[in-house]
Image: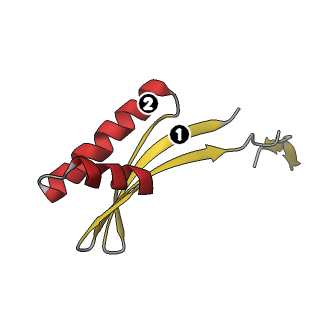
Amino acid sequence: MKLNTINVIEYAGDAVLGVHSFSDNAEGVKEAEERYAAIILEHQGDATESEMDIYFEDGWFEQDDYQVFLTHSTLPDAPEVEPEEKGDREVVE
């Protein structure tokens, strides 16, 4: 099984403020883009259509020490793990 997501990640300074993950399908992409736009507008107040186009094209917005990113993530199929015997019990690592 693969885990595909679209993420809105917020940073301030060196700290992660939030990670908002959505399914990487049409509905999830729409939700993530709406969240990304709302966060930008919260911090910038207003933005022109051309500014928003740039933020979406870059997948990145920065103001002072605050940053927000719009990214896609894919975790590949995990290998099957066989139980390993440890004494009298089985342990899956």
Image quadrant holding the N terminus, namely: top right
Left or right, residue 79 beside residue 14: right
Q: Give the residue at the far top of this rendering.
A: 27
In depth, the one of 81 and 28 nearer the eye is 28
Q: Are marks 2 and 1 in contact (CB under 8 Å)?
A: yes
Which image quadrant for residue 28?
top left
Mark 1 residue type: Thr
Indicate whether 4 appears above or below 26: below
Indicate whether 83 appears above or below 54: above
Which image quadrant for residue 38?
top left
Query: Which numbered disc covers residue 23?
Result: none
Q: Give me the residue at 34% from left, 49% from top.
A: 53
In depth, the one of 27 and 13 nearer the eye is 27
| Colour setting | secondary structure
Left or right, residue 41 beside residue 54: left
Tell me the residue that label 2 is attached to.
28
- Residue 12 at x, y = what percent? 29, 68
